[in-house]
Image: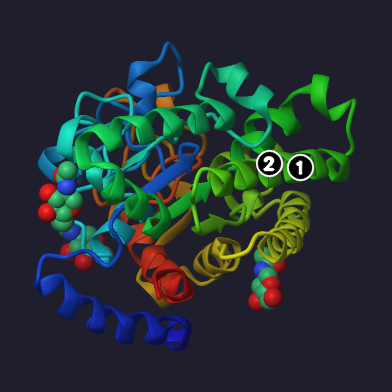
């Protein structure tokens, strides 16, 4: 574990106390709500007319029952581990799935959609669910749950739940960097500011609907994603410095905006989860954490394949994804998600108590 020990220690101590509570079968918070893009989508896109899907092998090959659920991973997402760490016996259902019904809804729901982002037009490009539509679904959810759990219970579900937001990567990698209609019109800084405005609106909307404990992830080191190195690395096999600079700049804005939001909205806990530094360290020092490969994803050649390009016919998919930081061209492996979730837990304690 090396360099991560000091980082993880509070998380582990905390886990011990979690386990005491979990023995009673009571999760630490009543519910969890998840918004964003493919990093946290658990199958909403299965129900859309979009090419951004992953509900076929080899996706899910290391998941429960080897089931390709629509998660962009070989196994569990960081948010799945977070749900487990919080003591939930099952995962928050994808809101558009058949499982999102009756009592299943009382532990929350997942509204995330691969290809979505803070920029509304990103979701449109991929026919994904925009963040504003995700909020509309969340409103619909609230009305449903009053009918299932009663008004009093619904109020505490809403205000005590944890809200997890993970977005922004698609806005850059699948939109800004490849779309002249955007990058000829806005500088990267202007584009980031537009995303910030949309982020602030989104948080204000959630707050107005009763959310009080919100965690938002930073951008990952975009320049270290295998497909980004392939597409934007000009033949170099190293992380693309320019993309990482853009991500850090965005993340700094996210920090400032979040602090301002928290000051403006009484009772709001808004935590920024810095996944950038964590993933950057993993990519720079893979062996410290038991990983052998950081340049290539496991699926196919690992240089690009994602979504429909990562499929059962992909040539040379690796045998053991636990040695890979990345599962496909854009998404971490379950092994990376597992340790990422421990880190999230230690930085998210203030959201729980
Ligand atoms: C509200 O929650 C309490 C405690 O968890 C439970 O006993 C009760 O049945 C719930 N109300 C409804 C209408 O489900
Ligand atoms: C956000 O600010 C905190 C301190 O206020 C700092 O520890 C953290 O690294 C910052 N994160 C980013 C992504 O800038
Ligand atoms: C896969 O790799 C991990 C990490 O190196 C190792 O612990 C595990 O035993 C391997 N699994 C198989 C089936 O080889």
* Residue toward you, 24 or 87: 24
- Residue 348 marker: none
Q: Is mark 1 within 8 Å of ligand 2?
A: no
* Residue toward you, 131 or 81: 131
Residue at left offset 36%, top offset 31% = 143
> Could you say where residue 146 lies in the image, as x and y percent from the top left?
29, 37
Q: Is residue 79 visible?
A: yes
Quarter of the image for residue 58 reads top left
- Residue 197 marker: 1
> Could you say where residue 43 lies in the image, as x and y percent from the top left?
32, 30
Callout 1 secondary element? helix
Residue at left offset 88%, top offset 32% = 186
For residue 297, side relative to residue 258 (left or right): left
**Marks 1,2: beta carbons within 8 A:** yes
> Could you say where residue 86 lies in the image, as x and y percent from the top left?
28, 65
* Residue toward you, 259 or 216: 259
Classed neighbour count for the residue bearing mark 2: other residues with Cα under 10 Å, few (<14), some (14–19), many (≥20): some
Colouring scheme, one of rainbow, by chain, secondary structure, one colour: rainbow
- Residue 201 marker: 2
The Cα–Cα distance between marks 1 and 2, rounded to whole angstroms, is 6 Å
Callout 2 secondary element? helix
User: Which quarter of the figure is the C terminus placed in?
Assistant: bottom left
Quarter of the image for residue 124 reads top right
Using the image, determine if residue 269 lies above or below residue 310: below
């Amino acid at each position: 574990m090396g360099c991560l020990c000091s980082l993880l220690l509070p998380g582990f101590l905390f886990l011990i106390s979690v386990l005491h509570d979990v023995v009673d079968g009571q999760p630490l918070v009543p519910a969890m709500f998840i918004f964003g893009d493919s990093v946290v989508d658990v199958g909403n896109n299965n129900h859309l007319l979009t090419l951004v899907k992953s509900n076929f092998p080899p996706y899910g090959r290391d998941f429960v029952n080897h089931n390709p659920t629509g998660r962009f991973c070989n196994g569990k997402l960081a948010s799945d581990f977070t749900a487990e760490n919080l003591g939930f016996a099952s995962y928050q259902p994808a809101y558009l799935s058949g499982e999102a019904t009756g009592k299943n809804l009382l532990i929350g729901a997942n509204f995330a959609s691969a290809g979505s982002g803070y920029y509304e037009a990103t979701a449109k490009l991929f026919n994904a669910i925009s963040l504003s539509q995700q909020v509309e679904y969340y409103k619909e959810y609230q009305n449903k749950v009053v009918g299932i759990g009663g008004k009093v219970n619904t109020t505490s579900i809403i205000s005590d739940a944890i809200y997890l937001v993970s977005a922004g990567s698609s806005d850059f990698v699948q939109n800004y960097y490849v779309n002249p209609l955007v990058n000829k019109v806005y500088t990267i800084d202007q584009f980031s500011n537009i995303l910030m405005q949309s982020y602030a609106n989104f948080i204000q909307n959630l707050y107005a609907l009763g959310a009080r404990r919100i965690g938002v992830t930073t951008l990952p080191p975009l320049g270290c994603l295998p497909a980004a190195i392939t597409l934007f690395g000009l033949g170099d096999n190293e992380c693309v410095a320019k993309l990482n600079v853009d991500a850090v700049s965005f993340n700094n804005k996210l920090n400032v905006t979040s602090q301002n939001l928290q000051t403006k909205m009484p009772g709001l806990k808004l935590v920024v989860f810095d996944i950038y530094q964590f993933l950057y360290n993993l990519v720079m020092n893979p062996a410290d954490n038991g990983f052998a490969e950081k340049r290539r994803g496991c699926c196919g050649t690992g240089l690009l394949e994602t979504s429909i390009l990562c499929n059962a016919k992909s040539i040379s998919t690796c045998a053991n994804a636990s040695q890979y930081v990345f599962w496909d061209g854009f998404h971490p492996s379950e092994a990376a998600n597992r340790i990422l979730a421990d880190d999230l837990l230690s930085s998210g304690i203030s959201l729980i108590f």
